[in-house]
Image (cartoon, rainbow, N blue to C red):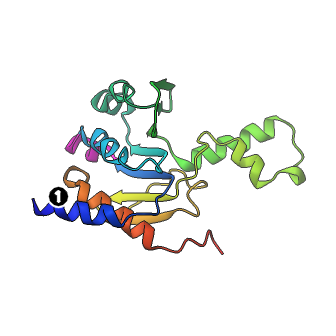
Amino acid sequence: MIYRLYEYLITRGLTVFPREICFMLSDADILSDTGKVEEVLTWTKEFPAIQKLIFHISTNDPAKIEELIQPASLGEKTRVHVSTPGHDVTYGAGTPEILIALGKKGREEITDAIIKIAREDIDPDDITEQMIEQHLIFQVNPDFVIKTGGNHLTDFLIWQSVYSELFFTDINWGSFRKVDYLRALRDYQMRGRRFGT
């Protein structure tokens, strides 16, 4: 009862939202609570301003994790894109859009982008930031990156998240509650974004 009241009070005060939120997770996080992705999606649907959820799951066994979280069933409620080193697949339609990246590494993504540019015989003097961005696998720009269970980030979206606001919580993924999500959103609202300036 107290948590419901607290959730209500925080929600009532939220007026500024990130458009794209990225959760940095490990396979151990998913194993601790396979249904948490769907819970976060449910909470997010209360805030139409949030247009995209990104879940990066660091794992050496993407197929196993994909089976555990069952992205096809999430696709009944929204558009879900799953990206692994071996394949990409999209399910469903609706908002917010979800990107689930399994076992992808940011350094590899940037390296692959440079290789693609090199194969196009582009003069090095003509290479721009925009060109590199156009060759990246993930065309996303998370406003807010949430890391549960400590402060170790992966290098996922290393290019795209350079101006993202970072939020670290000691609460493990399996224990992450709606009130914790709301607190994170409140923290985001209180920040003055400077985009590197």
Q: Position of residue 80 (x, y in %)?
A: 45, 31
Picture residue at 76% right of the left edge, 51% below the top: 130
Q: Is residue 121 above or below residue 158?
A: above
Please name the amino acid that badge 1 sits on.
Answer: Arg
Is residue 151 in view?
A: no
Q: Position of residue 59 (x, y in %)?
A: 37, 41
Give the quarter of the image for residue 12. Answer: bottom left
Q: Which residue has dot 1 on it?
A: 4
Left or right placement of residue 107 versus residue 21 in this view = right
Left or right placement of residue 91 versus residue 120 in this view = left
Q: Position of residue 71 (x, y in %)?
A: 36, 29
Q: Is residue 14 above or below residue 91?
A: below
Which portion, as a residue range, is magenta? 26-33
Along the viewing direction, whichever of 50 and 83 lies nearer the viewer: 50
Neighbor class of circle 1 (other Cα within 10 Å; few <14, some 14-19, many 20+) is: few
Along the viewing direction, whichever of 179 and 113 lies nearer the viewer: 179
Is residue 6 in view?
A: yes
**Number of numbered discs present?**
1
Picture residue at 88% right of the left edge, 50% below the top: 126
Q: Quadrant of the N terminus?
A: bottom left
Picture residue at 72% right of the left edge, 40% below the top: 115
Q: Position of residue 53 (x, y in %)?
A: 44, 45
Majority SS type along the magenta span? helix
Left or right placement of residue 141 versus residue 67 in this view = right
Based on the picture, tell me whether residue 59 belongs to the magenta stretch. Answer: no
Q: Residue furthest left?
A: 1
Give the quarter of the image for residue 70. Answer: top left
Q: Residue furthest front?
A: 12
Picture residue at 87% right of the left edge, 38% below the top: 121
Provide the secondary structure element on which disc 1 rests: helix
